[in-house]
Image (tube, rainbow, N blue to C red):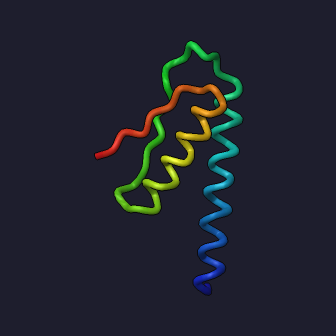
Amino acid sequence: MTRLRASVQRLAHAAALVLALLACAATQSSAAAPVVVASKPCTESHILAELVREVLVASGTPAIHPRG
């Protein structure tokens, strides 16, 4: 698999994850416990998790991304 194809595939997976999380968040009440967005210990994973957290918070869903 070429590097470009692998990058596009990772981006597609990340976009699908964001859409799935937003769909789940839309069904939850605002009084629910915050969504915990986890990530693997690598830079790309941390960036994607933080983006997901920011999208959830912007949509009105409380979310946290614990680091460590």
Q: Residue at 62% of width from left, 33% of height from top?
A: 58
Q: Position of residue 25 (x, y in %)?
A: 64, 30
Splitting the image into 4 quarters, where does residue 43 fall?
A: bottom left
Mark count: 0
Q: Residue at 33% of width from left, 44% of height from top?
A: 67
Query: 43 above or below 51?
Result: below
In depth, the one of 61 and 23 nearer the eye is: 61
Q: Position of residue 41 (x, y in %)?
A: 34, 57
Indicate the quadrant containing the N terminus: top left, top right, bottom left or bottom right.
Answer: bottom right
Q: Residue farthest to the top?
A: 31
Q: Residue at 47% of width from left, 55% of height from top?
A: 47
Q: Residue farthest to the left?
A: 68
Q: Residue farthest to the bottom?
A: 2
Q: Viewed as shown, does residue 31 lie left or right of 39?
A: right
Q: Position of residue 17 (x, y in %)?
A: 63, 49
Q: Residue at 39% of width from left, 55% of height from top?
A: 40
Q: Position of residue 48 (x, y in %)?
A: 52, 54
Query: 50 above or below 59?
Result: below
Query: 1 above or below 53?
Result: below
